[in-house]
Amino acid sequence: MQIGLRSDGKKYYLQLIFLVFCGGLMDRCGSRQESDNRPETNPFAVADEIISKIQIPQFKDTTFNIMDYGAVGDGTNDNSEAFTKAIENCHKMGGGKVLVPEGKFLTGPIHLKSNVNLHLDKGAAILFSRDKSDYLPVVHTSYEGQELMNYSPLIYAYQQKNIAITGQGTFDGQADNTNWWSWSGKDVYGYKEGAARQQDEHNLPRLWKMSDDNVPVVERIFGEGYQLRPSFFEPFECENILVRGVTFTNAPFWVLHPVKSNDITIDGVTIVSHGPNNDGCDPEYSRNVHIINCTFDTGDDCIAIKSGRNWDGRRVGIPSENIVIENCKMKDGHGGVVMGSEMSAGIRKVYVRNCDMNSPNLDRAFRIKTNTLRGGFVENVYFKNIRVGQVKEAVLKINTHYGTYANQEGEFMPTVKSVHLEDIEVEYGGKYGVLINGREESPVKDITLTNVHIKKVEEPVYVENADPVQFKNTTINSVKY
């Protein structure tokens, strides 16, 4: 048991007292909520079972065409009222399809309701307003793993069941260097010296302090006057979610961000969005997730599994688990499949198979990242039959010292164990084949590479503070390990 110091000099409570306060011996508070970690003898049979149990939403065969509610597809008329009326009427009538025909439809945020399938015909494009005031009043949302009241996500659902976004059309967030992106504080995205940005004291530091002080979420009010960007599609505390066939582009922030949601199917979706923090898909505190047949071409991680940040993650205490990713293509991005860095409540039971990753701008294929401020755990992760054409830095990177700049060290030792790669072919591995940087107090454990063949890497294996990696029929730079 340890006592540490906050940056303001106040002592933490003893961990035992903190755990009791949070609701019971790490079950709620996160960083030790691991399972018994017994190996799965046939992990992808488990994955198939997870998929079979996910409920895909079904809808009444009734159509509500937005044109019947006054929509005009000229790209300039504001169709917010037409979308609201069509969705509300569909919901009240027991559900069905809200149809968006061919055309360009400008709108403010779209709020989905239970039993509604928002369907875009081929040639349909929904353009989201560039006027930030349209995304008010604030709603209960999340930013980098911490809950708050902020600008509405572009497409939002709160405590709804049986919802879908389907079709062959495009959602265009219209974010660029003159709208939303500059708030990232990066010159390349239009930030000008002296302008407000998300790192300023009244933005993220204020939110972090509110989280540390356990301020109720309804009192964490941001929105107008603050610079925290909204996610693109965020189902919050929802069940039975389907996203199929559509394209997302030009997102302000994270693209697909299910929070505290269950039974999620993302099928045949294309994401092409190269702005700051433009992660493709970020399941957070979410369970029973199936991501299949998708293409990710992103400005940040292609898929990044999350479970809250710091004290907020430990407060919520819901691990992300039962996540199956298959038959996807990863192009540009910081990582192909990533866990963290917001993972304070833990991540387990992730299965990735039959994917292609290839781009000179893809930094890593598989990545796990956390630190002792965020803590959390990762366990029971399986990668199988992955083809990697080219990555920049590493095929597998595990780092429990992530972002260890000021205020990123704390009292919550992360654990990473049971990560397994099998049948992986890599043509150009970049700087490292395997790069692991663990903690002396908590070494990374049970990492296996079976039938993995990595070509053209500068340094095959770099491991620090980890149990020996287990190699079976594996070659790196044609050398057997």
Image (cartoon, grey):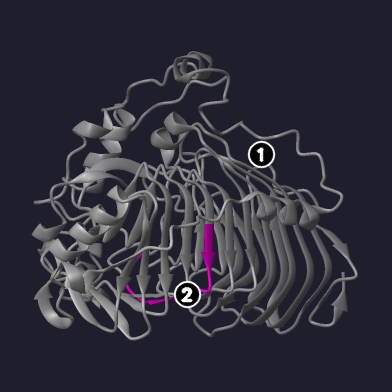
Q: Residue 245 carries which label?
A: 2
The residue carrying mark 1 is 442
Q: Residue 276's image quarter?
A: bottom left
- When the figure is inspected, residue 104 is found, relative to residue 193, above or below; the finding is below
- Provide the secondary structure element on which disc 2 rests: loop
Q: Please identify the quadrant where the C terminus is shown.
A: bottom right
**Residue 26 seen in the figure:** yes
Q: From the viewer's perspective, is 384 left or right of 277?
A: right
Category of crowding for the residue at label 2, using alpha-carbon neighbours closer than 10 angstroms: few (below 14), some (14–19), many (at least 20): some
Q: Give percent across and percent down for residue 35.
A: 70, 34
Which residue occupies the foreground of this view, 139 or 59?
59
Residue closest to the eye, 352 or 207: 352
Q: Residue at x 31, y 59 (%)?
A: 231
Q: Nearer the viewer, mark 2 or mark 1?
A: 2
10 Å crowding of disc 1: few (<14), some (14-19), many (20+): some
* Location of residue 114 with respect to 166 vertically, above or below: above
N-term mark: 2 or 1: 2
Magenta-colored span: 265-277
Q: Where is residue 33 in the image (x, y as percent from the top left)?
A: 61, 31
Q: Magenta stretch: residue 271 in it?
A: yes
